[in-house]
């Protein structure tokens, strides 16, 4: 009898397995594909490998401003893909090794929930049955295919998702991106940089979901300057061959793409593995959990994208840990006060906490300082672009940090410290006493903190 059966070996599942194994629990982890899930195999990691190549390429082309002459700079997509595969292979092997050292039994088969008795669960996989006292569902998410006419017929050929776009060995001359969210923008950034003519079609009046509106506009302007086209308030109606037809301001337009990326969101995977036999509560397609990652059925936990909401690998990690701690009877709860969001475009955009608009809608008064990134010496030393921005929002009543929004290189790394300040509810005075290394781009946060009146 296992202490924990975990279905799904992505960030939620494998971290849960590792933590549980390290704590001395007997763990079985079921994974039908490759360990690491979407994040490692067809999401976060491979896209970052690609984006680093496109960044190097654009920096090499722009290097003359830094006193470097580089001639005949070229881009070889097939070598970039090859390197990406190497990176993925290495990290997947790392997860496999972590499972070994944590004494986790990895079952490389599709799992099916068979029965749920009062004191145990039975899961079958690869012709065997496994019994466990606790069950963690970490089955992740899959691309949402919206009911756009013609999309399903073309899916996998010229209409592609995050999976196929990371495997293209040729740079499409024209790429149409349906959905200007995180996946859409990261891939648009990569392909525009390496030579595609990219068109982004977004239903909302802004790109990047709940990004700070001003930063969203700035990011859009960066890419427009490079030739990317954006159609906002534009709803895609149909795909026919290579033509994408959308409606905007009551008019119908058509754009053509050699490839069409479908990045209109993802949906939790709740079917195909016997979840219904457990009777857990599912709402709007996602498993309902409380802040201990418990489902409506005792001893059944759910973590990661399958619970909907944030759908971020770093949230899944933490949820995996919370679930395991609660299995171990250690009281642990999810806090969502400081979940960082990052878009790995060039420049990067990162934010944590609340926006001015959210503060307003919550009826909370805020104080805002907005600084150009040129207030940080290292930013000026290292970039010629000068379009970065940092916005720091304080809760006027408590003088604690409410949110930070940054567009700059290293934004993804800088935001980490801001999350700690929010989570720890530090006051302005306390934050001002933090010593930042100099020179760093992140010093912009310290600079902004001193622009507030105490
Ligand atoms: P998303 O939810 O970020 O963006 C989808 C966009 O498509 C939305 O802006 C929506 O308004 C638009 N849309 C939907 N239907 C449309 C239509 N018919 N016509 C035009 N626009 C339409 O979803 P995305 O980009 O697919 O990403 C999926 C998940 O993956 C997200 O939850 C995200 O958190 C995660 N992810 C995170 C990354 C990161 O943290 N850097 C990177 C990539 C993915």
Image (spheres, rainbow, N blue to C red):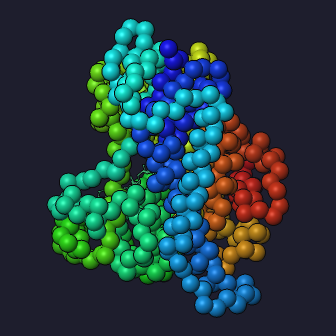
Q: Position of residue 360 (x, y in %)?
A: 48, 46
Residue at the extreme top of the image, as rendered? 118
Q: Residue at x 34, y 51 (%)?
A: 143
- Looking at the rendered structure, the number of numbered marks drawn on it comes to 0
The reply, left or right, for residue 186 in relation to residue 151 is: right
Res 365 seen here = no
Q: Residue at x 46, y 37 (%)?
A: 108
Q: Position of residue 344 (x, y in %)?
A: 55, 61
Near-viewer residue (291 or 12) = 12
* Quarter of the rendering containing residue 100: top right
User: If the picture is divided into quarters, which one holds ligand 1?
Assistant: bottom left
Q: Position of residue 371 (x, y in %)?
A: 65, 64
> As displayed, is residue 13 above or below residue 193?
above
Q: Position of residue 173 (x, y in %)?
A: 37, 81
> As displayed, is residue 184 above or below residue 138?
below
The reply, left or right, for residue 425 in relation to residue 203 is: right
Res 420 seen here = yes
Q: Residue at x 32, y 31 (%)?
A: 273
> As displayed, is residue 277 above or below residue 435?
above
* Quarter of the rendering containing residue 184: bottom left
Near-viewer residue (296 or 101) = 101
Residue at the extreme front of the image, as rendered? 127
Q: Residue at x 67, y 84 (%)?
A: 63
């Amino acid at each position: 009898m296992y202490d924990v059966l975990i279905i799904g070996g992505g960030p939620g599942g494998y971290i849960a397995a590792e933590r549980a194994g390290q704590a001395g629990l007997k763990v079985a982890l079921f994974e039908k594909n490759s360990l690491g899930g979407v994040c490692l195999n067809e999401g976060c990691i491979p896209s970052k490998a690609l984006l680093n190549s496109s960044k190097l390429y654009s920096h090499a082309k722009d290097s003359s401003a830094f006193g470097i002459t580089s001639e005949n700079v070229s881009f070889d997509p097939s070598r970039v893909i090859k390197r990406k595969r190497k990176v993925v292979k290495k990290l997947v092997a790392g997860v496999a090794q972590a499972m070994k050292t944590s004494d986790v039994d990895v079952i490389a088969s599709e799992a099916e929930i068979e029965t749920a008795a009062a004191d145990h669960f039975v899961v079958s996989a690869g012709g065997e049955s496994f019994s466990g006292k606790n069950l963690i569902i970490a089955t992740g998410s899959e691309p949402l295919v919206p009911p756009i006419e013609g999309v399903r017929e073309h899916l996998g050929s010229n209409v592609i998702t995050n999976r196929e776009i990371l495997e293209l060995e040729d740079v499409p001359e024209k790429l149409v991106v349906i959905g200007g969210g995180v996946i859409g923008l990261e891939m648009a950034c990569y392909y525009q940089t390496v030579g595609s003519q990219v068109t982004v079609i977004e239903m909302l009046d802004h790109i990047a979901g709940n990004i700070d509106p001003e930063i969203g506009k700035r990011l859009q302007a960066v890419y427009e300057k490079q030739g990317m086209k954006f159609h906002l308030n534009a709803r895609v109606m149909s795909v026919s061959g290579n033509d994408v037809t959308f409606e905007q301001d009551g008019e119908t337009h058509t754009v053509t793409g050699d490839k069409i990326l479908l990045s209109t969101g993802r949906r939790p995977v709740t079917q195909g593995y016997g979840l219904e036999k457990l009777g857990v509560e599912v709402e709007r397609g996602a498993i309902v959990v409380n802040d201990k990652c418990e489902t409506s059925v005792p001893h059944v936990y759910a973590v990661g994208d399958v619970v909907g909401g944030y759908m971020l690998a770093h949230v899944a990690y933490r949820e995996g840990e919370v679930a395991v701690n609660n299995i171990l009877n250690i009281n642990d709860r999810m806090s969502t006060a400081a979940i960082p969001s990052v878009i790995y475009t060039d420049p990067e955009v990162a934010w944590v906490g609340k926006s001015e608009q959210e503060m307003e809608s919550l009826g909370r008064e805020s104080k805002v300082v907005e600084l150009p990134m040129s207030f940080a010496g290292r930013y000026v030393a290292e970039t010629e672009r000068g379009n970065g921005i940092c916005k720091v929002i304080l809760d006027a009543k408590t003088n604690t940090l409410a949110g930070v929004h940054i567009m700059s290189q290293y934004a993804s790394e800088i935001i980490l410290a801001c999350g700690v300040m929010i989570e720890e509810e530090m006051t302005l005075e306390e934050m001002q006493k933090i010593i930042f290394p100099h020179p760093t781009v992140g010093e912009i946060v310290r600079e902004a903190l001193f622009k507030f009146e105490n």
